Amino acid sequence: MRVRLEDVARATGVSPKTVSRVLNEEPSVKESTRKKVLAAMEQMNYRPSPAARGLAGSRSFLIAMLYDNNENPASTYLAEIQDGVLDACDAHRYSMMVSPLRLRGHDPIRRIDALVADHHIDGVIMTPPLTDHAPLLRRLQEHGVPCASISPLQREVAIGVCMDEQQAAKAVVQHLLELGHKRIGHILGIANHGASRWRLQGYKDALAAAGLPFDPALVVQGEFTFGSGVIAARGLFELARRPTAIFAANDDMAAGVMWAANERGLKVPKDLSVCGFDDTPLATQLWPPLTTVRQPSREMGKLATLQLMDKLRGRGPGLLLQVPYSLQIRESTAKP
Amino acid sequence: MRVRLEDVARATGVSPKTVSRVLNEEPSVKESTRKKVLAAMEQMNYRPSPAARGLAGSRSFLIAMLYDNNENPASTYLAEIQDGVLDACDAHRYSMMVSPLRLRGHDPIRRIDALVADHHIDGVIMTPPLTDHAPLLRRLQEHGVPCASISPLQREVAIGVCMDEQQAAKAVVQHLLELGHKRIGHILGIANHGASRWRLQGYKDALAAAGLPFDPALVVQGEFTFGSGVIAARGLFELARRPTAIFAANDDMAAGVMWAANERGLKVPKDLSVCGFDDTPLATQLWPPLTTVRQPSREMGKLATLQLMDKLRGRGPGLLLQVPYSLQIRESTAKP
DNA sequence: GCCAGAAATGACAGCGCTGTCAATTAGCAT
DNA sequence: ATGCTAATTGACAGCGCTGTCATTTCTGGC
């Protein structure tokens, strides 16, 4: 009933092992036999059994997508990444497992061990902050499991995909400066995330380039959530000299800023300009629509996965690609 | 290096087959041996190989989560469901594959066939509108793959989880009526979704209960997206006798209504009351916060999966559970 | 105390592939 | 042609488990 590798072999007149070689794209197969075998596979609609391949061989054709369940409230971001990863998996007949980790509380290392021991995963895709969790990376390396990262902090060693967030953040703030703002607040993301650092640095860069002093009072801690944006904004509103514009390190917090502005009776953008980062769907759903930086999450998930697969299939070392950003200027920013 | 079933057998002094029986919770094992074996498994940290189990046996311990990629813009909803499904999988040592289908365009049946043929999936979890796609359901049945549904239209045959959406919708509209609204608009969801029907019916029920006539002009088509909510709301605003309240069939569209209200200079809730359905994170991030119906998506994903697993493990027939709704009254609704 | 039948256990093959290593064939210089 | 290395192919075992069916060990009833 099921077409097996052996059936293809018989139909082609070669040994099962040769069919296996074709299936695995091994080099030492004569071009003519390869063609014959591929044709037979196609014609017989042969589909290799992942279970058998996993059991017999060293590869499982399975990758895992890892993310941190505690620190990732922006579910739309993850969902888009996941879509991109699935796209890439489809293209190369890999399967994907989803594995939420909890850096705090549960032991992520045990999860990894289980994933490797049980499923023999071939590789992993990670999102921040896992991308920079040293014990995790070390363990993956010990297991010999290659991984691709999305927006990793360490750009020298990782493969995957990133964006020049610092430059992008600088561009956003420059946009505010060009509008004439002099006092610009910034809401930080979670401390150990690369995104927080780069976006802060871009903010500083823009001020420096404009010859404006950096005022620590204008920079408050957030944690990438809507709620933290609300709280941070309230803090900024209490300042003696209230900022005329706020650059939040992501859209969720920017939404929080706008909410807090409403709460206080401030009009955006008349009384306050707001910008965010990521261009999540939320950005265009807010009133007024949010000026932000577009980050092509889905594409990034796909590209990172493709790099991982290049490596898994021995097609190259795997690179850290850089995707371009684009500034989305909308109605939440205006002259002070 | 790897602890195998055989190792556990040797350590316990029984045959591998008996260990296998314990592993699979088969009935005919003496209690004393079961205990011994379980203790050895625990002590040796034995982890069965899914690949070997899948290859040798008829079960794969894999379930697939199916959703429609075209018609599901509310990614937070899916993400929450997915989290719940993963929770349940964890609890019973199942693995989950994610498989986006495209009802329109790509052929979903081929996807299912591939999933069954390649991975021998034991069961599937589906979200609307897949839950009511007849060809898909038929094919799954032909393959003998049990499935659990989240909010299926056909409540008689399905297993999984649902909510009394009609009653919930009625409650929302009654809330508006109690505030004193007489002209209440409704924005429909995608036509063939159960959610659209039930929510419309609840709307009608509430009007009827209050002795108000049903005015078709106040009901406009939407498609569950933010954008469709904006367009639908613009249409309602053009009416000669503009409604004083709008009940949108989900939060995304309700957000669209509020956006359109802003666009037109209408104040919510002073000039217009708005309510939605689902209580997505968006609901509390809008200004003013949205009155809506809380749907416990994550819990629903988990419960549906648990029902599926009961069936897979022969623990019962699998039920269609009903979860309670709860009305979330916030600031987007007020007296007209 | 013996036997039928049920309960519990075991022996063994084989799921569908790939790793290892041996065997064959092709390619090339002599 | 001949011998040699390199390219290509094949034989065979076995990955870690479960299905089938045979076997052993308990039961209780007489």
Image: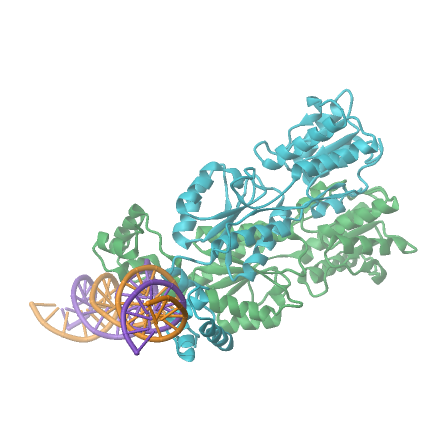
Chain colours: A cyan, B green, C orange, D purple
- For the point 83% across and 34% down, the residue is A267
Q: How many marks?
A: 0
- For the point 82% across and 55% down, the residue is B231
State the image quarter where residue A328 is shown.
top right
Residue B39: percent from left, percent from top:
28, 48
Q: Residue furthest top?
A: A240
Residue D9: percent from left, percent from top:
37, 72
- The one nearer the camera, B263 or A118, is A118
- The one nearer the camera, B88 or B218, is B88
- For the point 59% across and 50% down, the residue is B80
- State left or right for residue A49 relative to residue B46: right
- State left or right for residue B243 relative to residue A46: right
In the image, is residue B178 above or below residue B219?
Answer: above
Residue B191: percent from left, percent from top:
72, 64
- The one nearer the camera, D7 or C20, is D7
- The one nearer the camera, B157 or B176, is B157
State the image quarter where residue B158 is shown.
bottom right
Q: Residue furthest right?
A: B240
Residue A257: percent from left, percent from top:
73, 34
- State left or right for residue A42 relative to residue B243: left
In the image, is residue B66 above or below residue B266?
Answer: below
Q: Visible in this render: residue B191? A: yes
State the image quarter where residue B28 is shown.
bottom left
Q: Quadrant of the C terminus of chain B?
A: top right
Q: Visible in this render: residue B296? A: no
